[in-house]
Every structure is written in structure tokens, then in C-alpha cells.
Amino acid sequence: MRRHGDDEVHEHDRGLSYDLPMLARRRMIRLLAGAGAGAGLAALVGCTAEDTASESTSPSAGTSTPASTSSAAGCAVVPEETAGPYPGDGSNGVNVLKESGVVRSDLTRSFGDSAGGTAEGVPLTFTLTVVDAASGCGTPKRGAAVYVWHCDREGGYSLYTEGVADENYLRGVQETDDRGQVTFTSVFPGCYTGRWPHIHFEVYGSLADATTATAITSTSQLALPKDVCDTVYATEGYESSVDNLGRLSLESDSVFRDGHDQQLAAVKGDVAEGYTATLTIAV
């Protein structure tokens, strides 16, 4: 089975030189769509890459925290990043956002008219907190919506990658609660050729905007810390991720090499019980 990291598929994920034109087009569309809604909506969180110079690489490590906390970084708007070639939001082919069942917290199973598969891997529950940058990050963005997607443990993306193109797992939308939070249950993503382990997300002004795939507020990525990745990738099913991660660092990743302080999640847990990840997103 050909996965995302193989040469044929990897041709569609060629790093920054490929992603910049796509990102420029997406930004132009958003500017035109949002001109009447008012300016001032800032960019969001981004992708993931490893920091081999500063992070622990011990296989026994079970907890990791970001190199820079919100108190150290201040109220910084997270960077706008590329959605990559597999967004599933209608900007590159298929649009899962308009399908019944996409609003959900458990991402592990496919839904609707898909093949009905389940993504296997080490459990990962992640919570994103969306806050208003204009208020000094002290005000949660209630009633916004977040669409998330990521690869499976073998590096494949549902809807696109050969072998899982008939699946739509590891994708979903939720509306933020009174604390500005959304929480998703998933599996720990693998590391495919050329990219640091990450989770994509798009923030929308409302659930209605998200489920009609209109008026994206921000697109970014969440990065996962190296020590936890090392531990997870030592388990069954993640074998290809070991070599792929060994050839990367946060500083060399095409998305995170210009900085990842606002994108690196805090992760706790262990392989047996699963992991929890948290990240605050200022928009």
C-alpha cells in the first residue's frame, strides 16, 4: 500500500516552495470574502516540527511542555500556515465539511458514506482554546468553530491517500464552548517524509461558516514535541515514523523553521493510557 510518505504521493507535499503559492491564493480568497465583515481578524496557530537542540529525546519521557509559554511569549497571534494539499475543505477537491456527521468530537471512525474504517494508534485527546488577541488574549472566542485534520499512524490522509481515500476519519468540526474550547479524541499522528508531526486546523467565525466551508478566519498547524513522538513511535504500527523523524527537526521543517513558540502543544500522558495535548490559539 502506498502511503503519504512514498515518492509518488510525496510529490504533492513538497514543502514551502509548493505551499506558498497555495497559501497566497487562500489568503486572497479570505481577504475578498471578509472585506465586508470587517478587518482585524488575525492569523492563527500552525504546524509541527522538532526542536532537537533543546528538547529531551529520552524514549521514557511521558510529558512535554512548550519551550515558550503564553506568559513568556505574551499575547502573540499564532502564525498563519498552509493547509497543505489534503485539507478536505473544498479548496483542493473533496469537501468533507458539508457532509452530515462532520460535527463531532471522536475523530477515530469514518462516517456517512465512507468505507467505515477506524484509525488505529496510540490514543490522543487534544484541546484547543481559541482566544481574542485584541482583548489581550483574556477573552475566549465563544461560538467560533474549529475544523481539524491530520494523518494516520502510517502517514496517510483520509480522502486523498491511496488505500484510505474512501475513508474520512481523523477529520471533524466542533463549536467552541463558553471557555473558547474544543476537544477532540483521536490517535497520535505518524511522521511522514519531509514534515514534522503535526495537526492541521482552520478556525471559523461560527459553526454555520464551518459547515458551509466559507469565511475561514485562520489556518494553522499544531506541532507535537519530540520527546513524546520518540516514545510513541517506538510502539507497534509507527515503524516508518522513526526514520522519518530522525531526518527532521523543528528548525529544518518547512513550516516551523521560522518559529514555533505559539504552535508547540503541551503534552502529558503515556503510551498505555494515551496522551492529552493542549494549545491556546490567539486570533
Image (cartoon, rainbow, N blue to C red):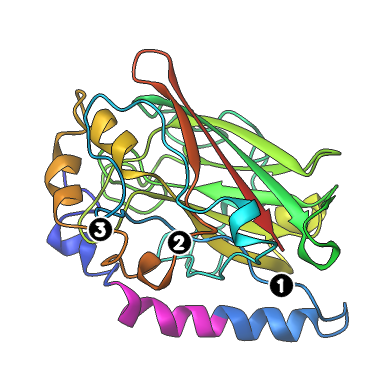
> Percent x, y for residue 209?
77, 59
Where residue 256 appears, x then y in whole percent?
Answer: 39, 65
- 177, above or below 29, in the image: above
Q: Type of residue at label 2?
A: His
Left or right of residue 174, residue 271 in this image: left
Gap in angstroms between the C-alphas marked 3 and 1: 27 Å
Residue segment shown in magenta: 15-25
Mark carried by residue 249: 3
In the rendered image, the residue lying farthest to the front is: 72
Tell us which disc is closer to us: 3 or 1. 3
Residue drawn at the location 81% of the way across and 55% of the way down: 206
Give SS at disc 3.
loop
Q: What residue is disc 1 on?
A: 42
Residue, disc 2: 260
The disc labelled 3 sits on which kind of residue? Ser
Instruction: Name the N-terminal-most of marks 2 and 3.
Output: 3
Magenta-colored stretch includes residue 223: no
Earlier sequence position, callout 3 versus callout 1? 1
Give left or right: position of 246 versus 233. left
